[in-house]
């Protein structure tokens, strides 16, 4: 029997304000990869600009475990590329999970995905779902609090991840580092307690978002209007430019209306914080 699998992997938002390269959350947008043994190598993607050959990131990840000869790859995705929403992490995790499940390899998916991606936060959220804390070992996971939702505002100008990383300094002021430790602690406590007041206080960042302001000025403008627009707070998602507004589900409708009025240049989308990570189904 020819092997045939469908893998679904969630989008992710990394950093979550103060948790640079440490914190991330899975979001309800997803990438779907269908792989089938057909006897011919084939790649088709419905995502504009995604390669249809062996350079495709799903294929490259798959081939880190098993040759892709004779495999057909079909890729569908709700995750906007180059927006800071973990599209590359989702592709990597999808390719690895597909090969691992098809050939029963029991591979260390998270560790391999982290090595391919170069940092752990997005891939950890993609693999495990929920909120993740990455410390160099196995990530620690928390369930999303009941009632917590998000709204994305995605400005049209992409931000290349290498440019965002290049903007970071090797050393940071002690006061900024201390403030971020305090904020990250409040955020994790707020998530664990389902305390929206603590979550809002915990979203403040002094390390990476201010340093990258010139790369996404429109994103920072919107972030600074978060409470005025009706959100608990907001964070730049990963390298940007997407802005993730955090809110209680009862606020979501009004927040979306306010954002659509204030950010006519942006794509506005409602998202949930997804409890589940990568999922494989056999056909």
Image (cartoon, rainbow, N blue to C red):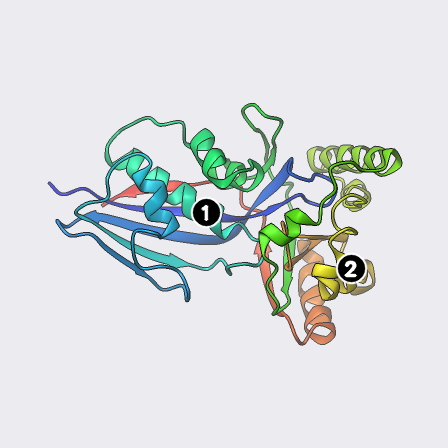
Q: Is residue 4 visible?
A: yes
Judge depth for marks 2 and 1 and give the one in front.
1
Total numbered circles = 2
Q: Residue at x 45, y 38 (%)?
A: 116
Q: Earlier in the sequence, mark 2 or mark 1?
A: 1
Residue 208 left/right relative to 151: right
Q: Nearer the viewer, residue 255 or 93?
A: 93
Q: Residue at x 30, y 40 (%)?
A: 63
Residue on which disc 2 sits: 226
* Percent position of residue 192, x then y: 69, 33
* Percent position of residue 207, x then y: 78, 43
In the rendering, which numbered label is found on residue 265? Answer: none
Quadrant of the image occupied by residue 93: top left
Residue on which disc 1 sits: 90
Q: In this picture, is 213 found above or below 13? A: below
- SS of the residue under disc 2: helix
Q: In this picture, is 43 found above or below 193? A: below
Residue 238 left/right relative to 247: left
Q: Nearer the viewer, residue 6 or 21?
A: 21
Quadrant of the image occupied by residue 264: bottom right
* Percent position of residue 194, x then y: 71, 39
């Amino acid at each position: 029997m020819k092997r045939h699998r469908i893998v679904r992997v969630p989008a992710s938002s990394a950093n979550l304000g103060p948790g640079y390269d440490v914190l991330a959350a899975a979001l309800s947008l997803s990438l779907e990869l269908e792989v089938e043994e057909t006897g011919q190598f084939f790649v088709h993607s419905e995502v504009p600009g995604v390669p249809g050959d062996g350079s495709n990131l799903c294929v490259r990840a798959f081939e880190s475990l098993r040759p892709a000869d004779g495999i057909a790859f079909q890729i569908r995705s709700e995750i906007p590329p180059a927006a800071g929403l973990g599209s590359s992490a989702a592709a990597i995790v999808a390719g690895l999970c597909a090969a691992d499940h098809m050939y029963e390899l029991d591979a260390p998916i998270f560790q391999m995905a982290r090595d391919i991606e170069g940092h752990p936060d997005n891939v950890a959220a993609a693999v495990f779902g929920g909120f993740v804390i990455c410390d160099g070992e196995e990530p620690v996971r928390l369930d999303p609090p009941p009632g917590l939702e998000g709204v994305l505002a995605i400005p049209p100008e992409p931000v290349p991840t290498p440019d965002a990383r290049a903007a970071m300094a090797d050393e940071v002021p002690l006061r900024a580092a201390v403030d971020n430790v305090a904020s990250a602690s409040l955020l994790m406590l707020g998530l664990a307690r389902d305390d929206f007041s603590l979550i809002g206080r915990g979203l403040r960042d002094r390390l990476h978002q201010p340093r990258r302001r010139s790369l996404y000025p429109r994103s920072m403008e919107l972030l600074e209007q978060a409470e005025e627009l009706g959100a608990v707070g907001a964070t730049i998602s990963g390298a940007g430019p997407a802005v993730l507004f955090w809110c209680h589900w009862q606020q979501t409708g009004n927040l979306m209306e306010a954002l659509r009025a204030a950010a006519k240049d942006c794509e506005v989308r409602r998202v949930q914080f997804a409890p589940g990570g990568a999922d494989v189904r056999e056909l």
